[in-house]
Image: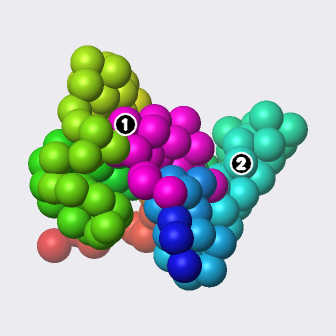
Amino acid sequence: MSRTNRNKTLAAAIATLGGFLGLHRFYLHGFKDWVGWLFPLPSALGILGVLRARNLGLDDQLAWVLIPLLGFTLAAAGLTAVVYALTTKEKWNAHHNPGAAPDHPAGWTTPLTIGILIAALMGSAVAFMSSLAFSFQHYFQYQVEAAKALSQVPDQPLPPVSGK
């Protein structure tokens, strides 16, 4: 079965823009790739979390759990784009274009590849750090509110002080 050559720059671009849906995996390995099918579920749950936060406010605890799933999936796709962009042409062609010559143009690093690499680095760093900050902020905020609720017991008279 003949297959067309897989372009490294295009794979990195797809991972950067549509990697949270697994599109880069489908481009490289086809729709039978089970790893590619793992991406849409956490992304959809994360989008559901964003919608819940928009509709119910940031006090919705389920949104706190779901939103970081989208951020971590975006970060994973961005990291994948970085790995694709930094792969040598010989390694790329040996793995993704086995019938092609080691220096086939599909594995070349171009200025566009470098631009995509920079965008993927920035985007994945922002997604990852934002997800961490969002998760920790809301978790600790919830812990403080729970501690305040525990500390507010109804007023009871103090026991008499003994005169010893």
**What is the spatial separation of the Cα atoms under label 2 and label 1, in whole angstroms?**
27 Å
For this rendering, which residue is in front, 160 or 62?
A: 62
Against 80, residue 78 (above or below) is: above
**Could you tell which of marks 2 and 1 lies nearer the N-terminus?**
1
Residue 132, visible in the rendered structure? no
**Is 16 within the magenta?**
yes
Give the residue number, with chain letter if any, for mark 1. Answer: 9
Read off the magenta span: 4-22
Q: Residue at x 72, y 57 (%)?
A: 44
Q: Residue at x 33, y 21 (%)?
A: 112
Mark 1: few, some, or many residues within 10 Å (few <14, many ≥20)? many
Q: Position of residue 46 (x, y in %)?
A: 65, 53
Quadrant containing the C terminus in the rendered view: bottom left
What secondary structure do most residues of the magenta stretch adopt? Answer: helix
Q: Quadrant of residue 133?
A: top left
Q: Position of residue 127 (x, y in %)?
A: 43, 38
Q: Amino acid at mark 1?
A: Thr
For this rendering, which residue is in front, 39 or 33?
A: 33
Q: Residue at x 51, y 42 (%)?
A: 14
123 horizontally vs 44: left or right:
left
Q: Which element carries disc 2, helix, strand or loop?
A: helix
Residue 54, visible in the rendered structure? yes
Q: Quadrant of residue 66?
A: bottom right
21 horizontally vs 159: left or right:
right
Q: Which mark is residue 47?
A: 2
For this rendering, which residue is in front, 107 or 62?
A: 107
